[in-house]
Amino acid sequence: MTVSKNDLVYNYAVMRCKESQFLALDPSDIITYRKRDFQIDVLVANGKEAQRKYKGAVVDHVSVDEIMLLLVKGGERVSPARPARTRL
């Protein structure tokens, strides 16, 4: 992953959604995700676009540290060859 710090801070965001909302997401929008007790945290590259596209989901801008934790510890990466829906 080669992205500038400014891009991470100002564009990347975490969508917090229910499983039914997660299943409706376009896999190309998902960078990584983490299933929690009552929600799924999904890292997206463009928070504003995600907010427009998925009106019912909560989109939070997060710190670089939180993004790195999601990527490194417990995050499940989605590859184009393997859609997100099959990973649950």
Image (tube, helix red, strand yellow):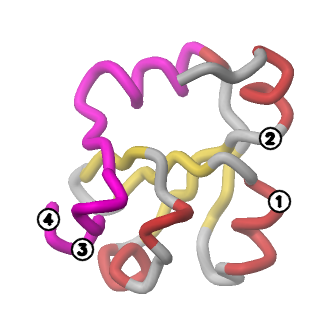
Q: CA distance from mark 1 to mark 2?
A: 7 Å
At a point 43% along the width and 81% down the height, the residue shown is: 21
Q: CA distance from mark 4 to mark 1?
A: 26 Å
Amino acid found under the numbered disc labelled 4 = Leu
Q: Residue furthest front?
A: 81
Which residue was labeled with disc 2? 11
How many neighbours does mark 2 have within 10 angstroms: few (below 14), some (14-19), or many (20 or more)?
A: some
Which numbered dot is residue 48? 1
Secondary structure of the residue carrying numbered label 4: loop
Secondary structure of the residue carrying numbered label 3: helix
Q: CA distance from mark 3 to mark 1?
A: 23 Å
Q: Which residues are magenta?
A: 65-88
Q: Are marks 2 and 3 in contact (CB under 8 Å)?
A: no
Amino acid found under the numbered disc labelled 1 = Lys
Q: Quarter-wise, where is residue 56 in the image?
A: bottom right
Which residue was labeled with disc 3? 85
Looking at marks 2 and 4 on the same chain, the residue that comes earlier in the sequence is marked by 2
Q: CA distance from mark 3 to mark 4?
A: 6 Å
Establish if 27 lies above or below 75. Answer: below
Secondary structure of the residue carrying numbered label 1: helix
Which residue was labeled with disc 4? 88
Q: Quarter-wise, where is residue 40 in the image?
A: bottom left
Which numbered dot is residue 7? none
Residue 66 magenta-highlighted? yes
Query: On the rendered structure, is 16 left or right of 71?
Result: right
Looking at marks 1 and 2 on the same chain, the residue that comes earlier in the sequence is marked by 2
Q: Position of residue 47 (x, y in %)?
A: 74, 54
Q: Position of residue 37 (x, y in %)?
A: 22, 54
Q: Are marks 3 and 4 in contact (CB under 8 Å)?
A: yes
How many marks can you see? Answer: 4
Query: On the rendered structure, is 47 left or right of 69?
Result: right
